[in-house]
């Protein structure tokens, strides 16, 4: 094969890769939400562990920064006020009133210490008993500057589940200037930037579509979509989830 033909074929292959839609068909075994804070001296080991969990393709690992430790001397630069409400709502749903950092909530139902890998694996096992979590396979497709989300038909014995879109930043290094972690640089993984409700899923096949431009704020470079049960603002079990990288 001549050098010219090699170059031509390389150009064609590159063009095909560029124009092909990006698609994510995910059947994770766990969604792990880490409630963390830059002002919490116990959190950096959990933040590091979350980065390791994020490399496991069977786990969707999310950093959910809270703001209730800001009074200790450092305002968390990634915190979203609604994250504190979400963590408290989880404790109300469980009935244990356990709200602390670093805390993980697994599949919307089981909580444990965010820096303990063994405890997280046990929580995953407990959350999967009975098959009530993650029975739904979502498909995310990124093409033509849009994100398409598809949820298949399936069994849903309860009320309609909420479908949430979360823009994510895959890795955010933060140098902390005051407080308990003064002088430390911590990398936060899959940071949830905001929550956008796409709609509801009640057992029928559903699709949603929105422009990538509407997602790419706050340095978001990927996205997670979660289907979660719950009522009156109290989150419940995760029925399905998937992630995709934004082009």
Image (spheres, rainbow, N blue to C red):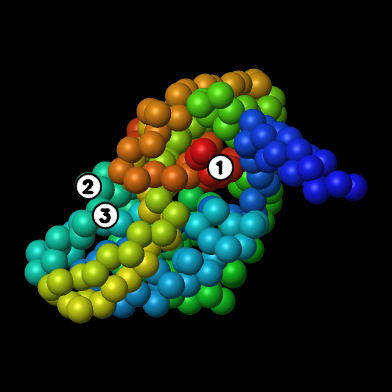
Rendered view: 201 above or below 121: above
Left/right of residue 87 with respect to residue 152 in the rendered view: left
Which residue reaches farthest right? 1
Left/right of residue 168 with respect to residue 32 in the rendered view: left
Residue in the foreground of this view, choosing between 214 and 42: 214
Q: Quadrant of residue 63?
A: bottom left
Question: Which residue occupies 24% across, 69% down?
Answer: 175
Task: Tell me the distance, in whole angstroms, between the alpha carbons under discs 1 and 3.
Answer: 21 Å
Q: Earlier in the sequence, mark 1 or mark 3?
A: 3
Question: Which residue occupies 76% across, 38% down?
Answer: 8
Rendered view: 69 above or below 14: below
Q: Which residue is mark 1?
A: 244
**CA neighbours of label 3 inside 10 A, class few (<14), some (14 to 19), many (20+):** many
Q: Are the residues tagged 2 and 1 within 8 Å (C-beta)?
A: no
Residue in the foreground of this view, choosing between 236 and 44: 44
Front label number (2 vs 1): 1
Query: Residue 78, labelled with which disc?
Result: 3
Q: Which residue is mark 2?
A: 81
Question: Which residue occupies 41% across, 59% down?
Answer: 171
């Amino acid at each position: 094969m001549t050098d010219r033909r090699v170059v031509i074929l390389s150009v064609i292959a590159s063009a095909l890769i560029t124009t092909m839609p990006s698609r994510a068909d995910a059947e994770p075994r766990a969604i792990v939400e880490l409630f963390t804070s830059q002002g919490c001296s116990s959190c950096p080991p959990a933040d590091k562990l979350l980065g390791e969990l994020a490399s496991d393709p069977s786990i969707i690992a999310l950093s959910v920064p809270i703001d209730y430790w800001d009074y200790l001397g450092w305002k968390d630069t990634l915190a979203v006020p609604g994250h504190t409400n979400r963590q408290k709502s989880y404790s109300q749903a469980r009935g244990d009133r356990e709200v602390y950092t670093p805390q993980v909530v697994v599949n919307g139902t089981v909580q444990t210490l965010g820096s303990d890998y063994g405890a997280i694996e046990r929580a995953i096992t407990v959350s999967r008993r009975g098959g009530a979590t993650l029975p739904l396979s979502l498909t995310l497709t990124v093409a033509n500057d849009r994100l398409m989300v598809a949820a298949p038909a399936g069994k849903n014995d309860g009320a309609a589940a909420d479908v949430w879109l979360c823009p994510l930043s895959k890795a955010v290094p933060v140098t902390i200037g005051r407080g308990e972690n003064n002088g430390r640089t911590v990398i936060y993984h899959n940071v949830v930037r905001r929550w956008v409700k796409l709609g509801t899923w009640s057992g029928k096949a559903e699709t949603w579509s929105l422009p990538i431009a509407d997602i790419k704020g706050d340095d978001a470079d990927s996205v997670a979509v979660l289907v979660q049960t719950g009522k009156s603002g109290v989150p419940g079990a995760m029925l399905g989830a998937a992630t995709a990288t934004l082009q």
